[in-house]
Structure formats: C-alpha cells, structure tokens
Amino acid sequence: MNPLQKGDKKLLNAWAFYDWANSVYSLVIASAVFPLFYMALFTKEQSYIHVFGTDIKNSALISFVTAAAFLKVAFISPLLSGIADYVGNKKFFMKFFCYLGAFSCIGLYWFSLEHIYISLLLYFFGLIGFWGSLVFYNSYLPDIAFEEQQDAISAKGYSLGYIGSVILLIVNLVMILTAPDAEKIMQMRYSFVMVGIWWIIFSQYTYYYLPKGNRTSEHKVTRAILFNGFKELKKVWISLEENTRLKKYLISFFVYSMAVQTVMLVATYFGEQEIEWESAGAATTGLISCILLIQLVAVLGAYATSKASEKYGNIPVLIFINSIWIFLCVAAYFIKLPLHFYIMAGLVGLVMGGIQSLSRSTYSKLLPETKDTASFFSFYDVAEKVGIVIGMIIYGVIDQITGSPRFAIVFLALFFIIGVVLLRKIPRK
C-alpha cells in the first residue's frame, strides 16, 4: 500500500483511532476497576501493608509505584524517541510499548497481596507501556496533520478514546454487578484481560495506515547513537531560547499538568476512602458510574474547548479551564456525600477533556518547522511525566502522613493557580 499523504482523512482517522484502542487502559486500569479491585484486597480496619521494609498506606503505596513508573518513562522516552527519529521507525517503538502495556494488563489477572512485588511490577510495566506508546503516538500529530487540522483531530482522538473506553467499562460494570458477591473480584480480574486484548486488536487499524516514520534512513542503532536521544533533547532545550512562546508555554504546562494528571490518577481512591457510601456494593456502582459520567462529559468538553479555542484562542481558553480546576480542588475538601461526588465528577469530566486535547494541540501549533517531531514531543512528555512524579509523590506523602487525601487534593490547587499566572505571561506574538 502506498503511504497516505499528510492531511489525508483516512490517515487522520487511523491515527485518532489509537485513542480508542489504548484509552481502555486509562479508564479501566488507571481510573475505575483496578483501583476498586486493589482497595477491595484490604479491609477498612487494615489499610496498611508491610512492604519495602515499612508499613505503607495502601493508596500511598500505589501513588509511589505510579510515581516510580512515570520517572522511568521520563528517563527512557528521550532515549527512544531520539533513536526513533534517527532510524525513522517510530512505529516499531509505539508497537513495543503498546504490547508491553497490553500483556501487563493481562498479567494483572494474577495480582495479589501474597505476591505483592510481582503484582506491583505488572502494574508498573502496564503504566510504562501505556505512556511509552503515547510518546510516539503524540509525535505523529504534526507529521500527519496540517496545523489547521490539529485541534480538531486531537479532540477527535480524545473523544474516540472516551467513547471506546466507556463501551468496555459498561461491559465490565455489568459483569461485576451481576455476579454474586463472592465472584465480583474474579470478574474484575477478567476485565483486566479484556483490556489487554482490546488494546492489541484495535491498535492494528492504526498500525496499518501509520507511516513507518518521518525518514527513510536505513541506519542501524549502534552504541555511537544509543544516547542520540539525549543530544536531541539538549537541542530542543537550546532551541527553546529562541522560541519564547513555546518555552513559557512548556513551563506553564509542566505546572498545571502536574495537578491534572495527579487528580485523574487518584480520583477513584479518593472517592472510595472519603465518600460516605451506603455499602461496599453502592461504592462500586457509584464510583464506576462517576467514572462513566466523567468520560461521557469529557467528549463534550473536548469538542467545546476546540470550538472555544477557534473563537478566543488557545491560551485564554486554557486560563479559563485552569481557573475552574482551582475551584474544583478546593471544593473537593468539603464533599462527603455521593451526590456531591456525582456533581464533582460531571464538572471534572467537562474540564478534563478540554485541557488534555487543547494542551496537546497548542504545543503542536507552537513547534518550529522540524522533521524531528518525536524529540520535541519527547520533551513535552518528559515535562508531563516529571510533573506527575512530583504530583504523585506529594499526594502520597500527604496521604501517608495525614491518613487522608483531602489535604493533598487542596494542595494541588496551588499548581493550578501558578499555572494561570504563567499562562498569562505567554506573549501573544
């Protein structure tokens, strides 16, 4: 098959469809079923586990493991993206991380406290696979879409991801809720296997149409170029001195993304511990329903933000969305009832879809003319991942010390405030 030209609708749709394939991980594993499964392994009276030589609160432990995984991704992504640009085969690396993540999800079927170290390692690799593949997926955006297409196709990708992941989560929800109490945990284990299979199967459509890379070089990866990615990262950093808008935007993105990603990763753990549900069954139903609500509203948020950016500009819309996040973090400290949590979930979904899609397309628009897009998007992803590491560690430490995540969520509002200040300092031209 002849490679499709840049801007071709079939190519754009194939790229966006990877969000449909991989977003089941971020919903079922990171946000909905796995957090409930993990917390169900503990009792209300015994929420601490002896691991790594000390007693750690369950939600703090998963926060620290998540932070470690993101730190690993932040280190390897510039290495691999530089190599990918050099040999012109981004698709190979995207596939590798996709399959690493998918098979790790399948491996979560055997997650247990009795084998906690191996279990956490599977969770660790699943997260690396998901985020590692996104480094290369995101870097394709300026290669396959013209600037005027990027906001819309970025929003379409997120929307497809929300819709696809919701379909699988509904299936998993029916499996779990219709099973006898003694079998609910097993149904959750089956859902992890389904995530891995879904991810592998639906990603094939994307791989069929995506080009190999943006070069046709036949160079082999040798020791001489093994660290070429870090050289490329250094070039990106130097180039930022000549691109004030891009540099200021990246700094602001680093700060507010730290808070956004942390809130998204810990929302279910917060809801399970802090909301006064009538029963364990009500908690399962309520929390998964809230996650579904977030996903559905996020579709509206992504498209509404895309339209708003056309009228008012990307930066003003990002400032407005960050301001809403400040309110939500402060309000989270006071919510206790399920109804409050449902209302909060709807508002979070609206701004979550908007801030993710618009942040990605804004960065793509601000890039200088270059063929080494993977290196620039690696820099973007490194900023995001380091921010998540800091955010998750802060959350975990506050949760471990206070025994409650409420104070940690409020503290994250500070990062949104700083984000608004920094966004306002970005020059218009």
Image: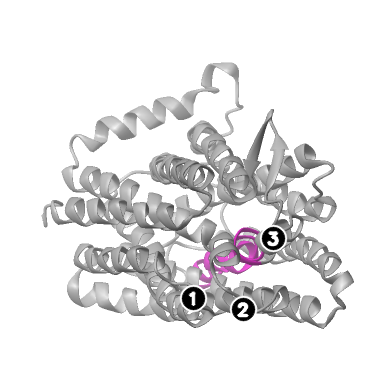
In the displayed structure, does residue 147 sit left or right of residue 266?
left
**Which of the 4 image quadrants contains residue 359?**
bottom left
Which residues are the magenta region?
A: 9-32
In the displayed structure, does residue 235 sit left or right of residue 200?
left
Q: Secondary structure at mark 2?
A: helix
Camera-nearest residue between 88 and 385: 385
Q: On residue 286, which mark appears?
A: 2
Q: Earlier in the sequence, mark 1 or mark 2?
A: 2
Tell me the distance, in whole angstroms, between the alpha carbons under discs 1 and 2: 9 Å
Q: Tell me the residue that label 1 is attached to.
A: 341
Q: Which residue extends farthest top?
A: 224
Camera-nearest residue between 69 and 51: 51
Image x and y of residue 419, in percent: 25, 53
Q: Secondary structure at mark 3?
A: helix
Camera-nearest residue between 373 and 355: 355
Camera-nearest residue between 5 and 313: 313
Q: On residue 34, which mark appears?
A: 3
Tell me the distance, in whole angstroms, between the alpha carbons under discs 3 and 2: 15 Å
Whether label 3 touches label 1, CB < 8 Å? no
**Amino acid under disc 1:** Phe
Image x and y of residue 34, in percent: 69, 60
**Amino acid under disc 3:** Phe
Q: Main secondary structure of the magenta part?
A: helix
Is 18 a magenta residue?
A: yes
In the displayed structure, does residue 308 sit left or right of residue 282?
left
Foreground: disc 3 or disc 2 = 2
Foreground: disc 3 or disc 1 = 1
Using a 10 Å C-alpha cutoff, classify the residue at mark 1 as few (fewer than 14 neighbours), some (14 to 19) or many (20 or more). Answer: some
Residue located 49% across and 80% down the image = 342
